[in-house]
Image (cartoon, helix red, strand yellow):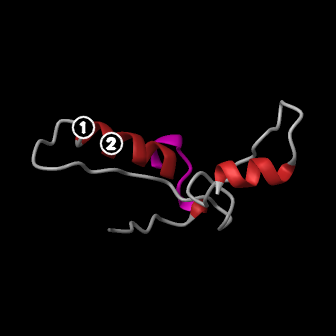
Amino acid sequence: MAFIKLRDFDERTEEVLGAEALVGRASAHFAGYRAGQIIFIQPPAIQGLGNSSGFSMYLGNQRVRSAEFAHQRCG
């Protein structure tokens, strides 16, 4: 795992200097790397708000069955 520190936001006046552009260029550069898989991600600006913060699952009961029945089936 590696982290890259970017210049201050005020110094990155062009879009190509932004984090999203850097992730895109790095991903394209290493896409053909055969010795392993390298994945570049941009973490969310606010911790806990993003794709990597976990997931939620909802189970819908579309039949007339009790919640207890669903709990027994799903563990």
On whether residue 60 falls in the magenta region, the answer is no
Residue 3 vs residue 37, the one in the foreground? 37
In terms of secondary structure, where does tag 2 sit? helix
On whether residue 17 falls in the magenta region, the answer is yes
Give the CA distance from mark 2 to mark 1: 6 Å
Seen as rendered, the residue at the extreme top is: 62
* Residue 24, placed above or below residue 54: above
Residue 47 vs residue 74, the one in the foreground? 74
Point out the stretch of residues depicted in magenta. 11-18
Q: Quadrant of the C terminus?
A: bottom right
| Badge 1 amino acid | Ala
Q: Position of residue 46 (x, y in %)?
A: 68, 65
Q: Residue at x 84, y 30 (%)?
A: 63
For residue 50, side relative to residue 16 (left or right): right
Q: Position of residue 32 (x, y in %)?
A: 17, 36
| Badge 2 amino acid | Ser
Q: Residue at x 85, y 50 (%)?
A: 67
Report if the CB atoms under discs 2 and 1 are less than 8 Å apart: yes
Residue denoted by label 2: 27
Residue denoted by label 1: 31
Residue 68 vs residue 30, the one in the foreground? 68
Q: Residues within 10 Å of mark 2 (few under 14, many from 20)?
A: some
